[in-house]
Image (cartoon, rainbow, N blue to C red):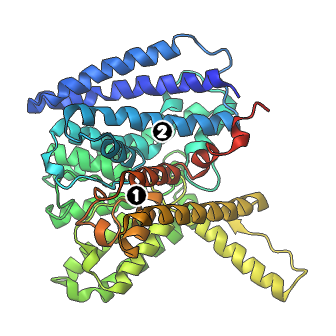
Amino acid sequence: MNFASILYILGTLIEVEGALFIAPAVVSLFYRESEGFIYFSFAMVCAIVGRLITINKVKKQIYYAKEGFISVAFGWIIMSVVGCIPFVLTGEIPHFTDALFETVSGFTTTGSSILSDVESLSHCSLFWRSLTHWIGGMGVFVFILAILPKTGAQNMHLLRSESPGPDVGKLVPKLGDSAKILYIIYFAMTVLQIIILLIARMPLFDAVTLTFGTAGTGGFGIRNTSIAEYTYIQQLIISIFMILFGVNFNFYFFIIIRHSLKEAFKMDEVRTYLAIIALSTAAIMINAKNMFESVSDGFIQSFFQVSSIITTTGYSTADFNEWPALSKVILVSLMFIGACAGSTGGGFKVSRLIIMAKAYIRELMHFIHPRLVRNIYMDDRKIKDETVSGVMVYLVSYVLVLMVSLLVISLDGFDFETNFTAVMATLNNIGPGLSHVGPAGNFKDFSILSKYILSFDMLAGRLELYPMLLLFSPGTWRKK
């Protein structure tokens, strides 16, 4: 294993995070908050530490599969640990475990929180909390690959280890250019949402921070009521952009770079994703009609919550704990499904669901016609058997992590609905669950052990399980 390469990339991450701390420090100047000095001072510390680590250049800066997985796993852990320290130093989240939980939730774009009174935080801490969503949404290493002057072909393993979905490819031949294209699209959509929210008369600070949460499909709000206090128009804008950021970014590549709207809408995953949103919204509108003041109110609230849950954003406009059982089952199902592969959303991913469904149908047909040879296609391309097997292995790993996590946090004595949806909400990077961890609740009452388990789930869910699970494999640390 090339430990020098791993150490170099971790040092680079610390430098980058130090630079990011400047942003909340600048925000503090506008609001005359003393907490900004801590962010600025810690930015200097990160710059020095990161430079000391990276001062000696690595001769062969190449990351094979093992180095890629280890670099990504440790990178996200270190980013979270470093990112939580200002919360502790400012005293706004005094306990390290709580601060770490909040920061992991931010970078993994989960949105689960231990805070009962979000509005008590300073503006600079609220900004940093939301900025972690934006950075984590597209991916820390995608950002690194976009800014590094040179990236070898083997650095594909860094991108693969961090990117969501069953299969990851490059948009263009050069990996660094692919990363730049992704971030250009991501940045442009972010700016567009901020501008539209400003036109809709949302305050600038709210527009920026809520857009960070929408773009990263994270869900940290800056008000205790999440999005409920904003106008219907503003809620609708956020709903639409949540859906847009939950779409596979190849969709935008086809439209913007290749100028092919037809090719974009031929994507099976995107069509299925939009169909699930439409059907789920209609079902909840009908099932929970007695909970809404009018048809328009029912549409806005149903559409918003479906958009928020399937994209794993986690914003809320209502306490859906109070909705009928069928509506809650639909939302829990959407927690599992998640958004599209290659988006900023979490969950199992629509593409995996499609592959599983087609594989299931193929196996049923084999019972009837044992000699039948039937391939699985998606977007008119044949899906490799290795990809199908990978989806099944992922499902087994997913269920294993879910069950072990559920067993451990059950020691805290909460009801099953709380425990199950808490694991689902963190493993799928959603944010709120049901019962004690619903939109009106939070995760502060869980034990220290449970908070670390749920933090692991957030990291595992964001990194598609394998990078975090491989840390516990003895084979990962063998020299050969």
Q: Residue at the right extreme? A: 371
Residue ID for mark 2: 76
Residue 457 position, x and y percent, is 48, 54
Q: Quadrant of residue 264?
A: bottom right
**Amino acid on which disc 2 is placed:** Trp
Q: What is the distance, in whole Å, between disc 1 and disc 2 at their CAs? A: 25 Å
In the rendered image, the vertical position of residue 204 relative to residue 375, given as above or below: above
Q: Nearer the viewer, residue 285 or 219?
A: 219
Q: Which residue is mark 1?
A: 244
Disc on the earlier residue, 1 or 2: 2
Helix, strand or loop at mark 2:
helix
Please indicate whether residue 336 sits to the left or right of residue 372 in the image: left
Q: How far from the left and from the top, in percent, is residue 180? A: 50, 34
Quadrant for the N terminus in the image? top right
Please say whether residue 424 is visible from this viewpoint: yes
Quick one: which residue is furthest to the left in this view?
32
Amino acid at pointer 1 = Leu
Relative vertical location of residue 65 with respect to residue 367 in this rendering, above or below: above
Q: Is residue 252 visible?
A: no
Residue 240 vs residue 394: left or right?
Answer: left
Instruction: Please tell me how crowded label 1 is: few (under 14), some (14-19), or many (20+) other residues with Cα within 10 Å.
Output: many
The structure residue drawn at horizontal position 37% and vertical position 68%, both measured from the top left corner, is: 413
Q: Position of residue 439 (x, y in %)?
A: 26, 66
